[in-house]
Amino acid sequence: MNFQLSLLVQLQQLDLKLHDLEKQQRQIPERLHAAQSPVDEARKRAESLKTILETVAAERRSGEDDLSAHESHVQKMRGRLNELKTNKEYQAHLFELELANKKKDGLEERVLLAMERGEEKRKELDEVEKLLQELIQTLEREKGELETLSTKLADEVAQIEQDKQGLIASLEKRVHHRYSMLKSSMKLVVVATVQGETCQGCQLQIPPQLVASVKRADDLLTCPYCHCILYYEAALHETPEGVGNEEPVAQEQVEG
Ligand SMILES: [Zn+2]
């Protein structure tokens, strides 16, 4: 049974490694998303700034149109000054001109504000676009790295699957079945060593009689608490029984 147990221990190591690789594989889309979202955000910000810039430019143009219309109006008013007969009419006209000049100041202010706001937003847009370029570069780099990683992980998974098949071929059917059942119904670790009288799967003390049986390893024995298949580390390296010990996958365990 020790030889079978040593295969199970190796199988579990492969399964743990596989679990870790699959976890890394699952993280790839998340990592990609994490690199993608700042790009999307910066792009959205740039779009919204462009919209603001368009609005500001339209505001500036309308201000300039109003200003030039007003200026030609004032021009005409000035031209009429000479046509005025009485001093009273003249004074009234001057007053109107003064009002018109004040209105002109307001219009100029409006154009100026639009220009300032436009410059400010343009500067902001330049910064966002610069940032966007950097983020896109980071994203491309990350994409490349993740593609390489994805290929590497797939290769490793394929290799482990192959190694597993080799191990499983040497396992007794009932032993493999037991392992598979435990694995599907339980957690990640289903094979645990016994140290002293303690199961390393759950860290609980198991009955001395069970410890003795595990040391003899004449059958598949499980922990009464965590249901792990139990083995005794030192026993795995003793002279194995059975014919399967000539399998290359178990060679190092057997010889060790
Ligand atoms: Zn246990």
Image (cartoon, helix red, strand yellow):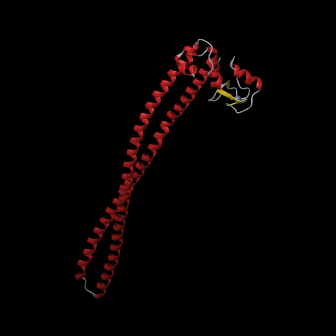
Where is residue 176? Give x, y as percent. Answer: 61, 18
Q: Name the residue at 57% across, 15% down.
A: 245
The quadrant of the rendering that contains the N terminus is top right
Total marks placed? 0
Specify whether 42 is left or right of 74.
right
Q: Nearer the viewer, residue 29 or 231?
A: 231
Q: Quadrant of residue 164?
A: top right
In this picture, is 251 found above or below 188?
above
Q: Name the residue at 55% across, 14% down.
A: 246
In this picture, is 254 found above or below 43?
above
Q: Nearer the viewer, residue 42 or 8?
A: 8
In this picture, is 191 found above or below 28?
above
Q: Name the residue at 61% across, 14% down.
A: 173
Q: Residue furthest top?
A: 243
Q: Nearer the viewer, residue 176 or 47?
A: 176
Specify whether 256 is left or right of 85.
right
Q: Quadrant of ligand 1?
A: top right
Q: Name the residue at 74% across, 22% down.
A: 212
Q: Nearer the viewer, residue 5 or 86?
A: 5
Where is residue 87? Give x, y as percent. Answer: 28, 88
Where is residue 35? Give x, y as percent. Answer: 45, 43
Where is residue 100? Give x, y as percent. Answer: 32, 76
The quadrant of the rendering that contains the C terminus is top right
Q: Residue furthest bottom?
A: 87
